[in-house]
Image: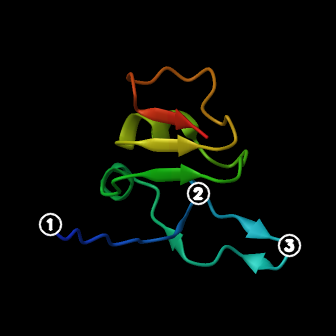
Amino acid sequence: MPPRCHITIRTCQLFDRPVNMPNGPVSNPCPWDRATISSFDLVLVATRHSSVNYRELADWAHCIVDTRNALSGIPTKTAKVWKA
């Protein structure tokens, strides 16, 4: 029998400054700091926002799946950013 794997999915919205959306403030925000971002196994960029500091994200995250090409032009380690 193959070993069991436990996966915990934690979702939150990462912004490096307060953001107000058309329906009000961002819900479920996470702190924007190295400790928080580096605690994730993977960061998914699902929407490109001008309020996100993608250079810090690239420096702090272990693995990034970028569905919006938000990190284009930002130098990163090999195999750290996956384009989807």
Task: Say which element carries label 3.
Answer: loop
Q: Which residue is mark 1?
A: 3
How far across and down, in percent of the image, does residue 40 sit?
A: 35, 57
Percent from the top left, x then y, of residue 79? Answer: 40, 28
Q: How many marks?
A: 3
Question: Regarding mark 2 in the picture, which secondary structure is present there?
Answer: loop
Q: Residue at x 65, y 44 (%)?
A: 67
Crowding at label 1, few (<14), some or many (≥20) Cα neighbours within 10 Å?
few
Q: Is residue 44 above or below residue 29?
A: above
Where does residue 7 sit, x and y in percent of width and height? 31, 69
Circle 2/circle 3 CB separation < 8 Å? no
In this picture, is 27 found above or below 53?
below
Query: Residue drawn at (65%, 54%), measured in percent from left and top?
Result: 46
Q: In the rendering, which numbered label is found on residue 56?
A: none
Q: CA distance from mark 2 to mark 3?
A: 16 Å
Q: Which residue is mark 2?
A: 15
On the image, numbered disc 3 is attached to which residue? 22
Secondary element at image label 1: loop
Q: Quadrant of residue 15?
A: bottom right
